[in-house]
Amino acid sequence: MAKSKVQHRDKPKSTVECAQPAADQSLPAPDLAEADAIAEAIKSVGARKPRVRMHFNRPNGAMFDPPHDDDGGFAYRLLDAFGTESTEFMSQAISLLCATLRAKGERLPTEHKLNAAIAVIDGMRPRDEIEAMLGIQIVSTHEVAMEMLAKAKHAEHSAQLQEYGTLATKLMRTFAAQIEALSRMRRGGEQKVTVEHVHVHSGGQAVVGVVNPSEGGAQSKMEDNPMHLPMQRSPRCAARTRAGTLCQSPAMANGRCRMHGGCAGAPRGERNGNWRHGHFTCEAIAERRQSKTVLRTARSFLESLPLPPKTKG
Ligand SMILES: [Zn+2]
């Protein structure tokens, strides 16, 4: 795809265009995916309604000028952007925006900043003055919140970080509340409806609606008890606990849990740490005991035999 330049409508030169560096011949052409994305972006941006923009005319002290020669048309665009037909409200709205957006010590914000803010409000399409006022508050809150966040980021000690961080958090919470207020206004105070998916497994029952567990508990009880999953039906340890109940922990292959069925007792034979010569192993002791028993039995048997009395020699 050949390099294509975005064909802008009769828009004033935006800052984005100004910020674009001069085409560098050493840079590669965008690849296929990027070219596709560019084409899509051109289509999508082209479909958007151009936001109203102002032109600052600082040298002669006049605040704003339209970026074209249609003064009346520009005034209508501004009125529409602020959802009003009152020029007083519109000019008041712009001066409020200027007051919150201007940098410290400056009389006015930059053209860039003001146009960005107006783009937000224009994009919100306020339907009336109240919505426009919310728009101004949203822009201003966002502006200050971001400033506090930047200050918190560059804080030099923890007290500063804490202070700016807290302020930023509060402002961002306010921002979210403002957005919520706007959408609530647009919903007209309708009740929120949540659509959720409910899966009912075979043999299961589902209750749609509010389930009060204190009433009809048996009916709302699930048939598919998660406590009866195959996993939960695994063999259990049957060792008797001190309370007299069964252990019930998952059992190992030997039928006992890891606490009850581990290698019982100390290792046998030479694997035992106390093994010296094997003379006192259970096996050796039992063997000796066995042989002694055999010996004892043999002796008593011999004694029971009717042997002729020994002759005195
Ligand atoms: Zn056990």
Image (cartoon, helix red, strand yellow):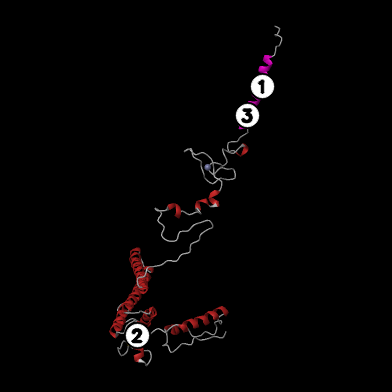
Residue 295, label in figure = 1
- At label 2, the amino acid type is Leu
**For marks 1 and 3 on the same chain, the one whose residue lies earlier in the sequence:** 3
Which residue carries the number 3 mark? 286
Question: Residue 67: which quarter of the image?
Answer: bottom left
Q: In this picture, is 256 found above or below 45?
A: above
Per the image, label 3 sits on a secondary structure element best described as: helix
Q: Nearer the viewer, residue 20 or 93?
A: 93
* Residue at 51% over, 81% down: 40
Q: Residues within 10 Å of mark 2 (few under 14, many from 20)?
A: many
Location of residue 187 with respect to 69 vertically, above or below: above
Residue 186 at x, y percent in the picture? 36, 74
**Distance between mark 1 and mark 2 Cα atoms:** 120 Å
Point 66% across, 20% down: residue: 297
Residues at marks 2 and 3 touching, judged by CB atoms closer than 8 Å = no
Q: Give the mark nearer the N terminus: 2 vs 3.
A: 2
Which residue is disc 2 drawn over? 78
Amino acid type of the residue that numbered disc 3 sits on in the rendered structure: Ala
Q: Is residue 107 left or right of residue 282?
A: left
**Does 305 sit left or right of 42 as displayed?**
right
> Which stretch is magenta?
282-304
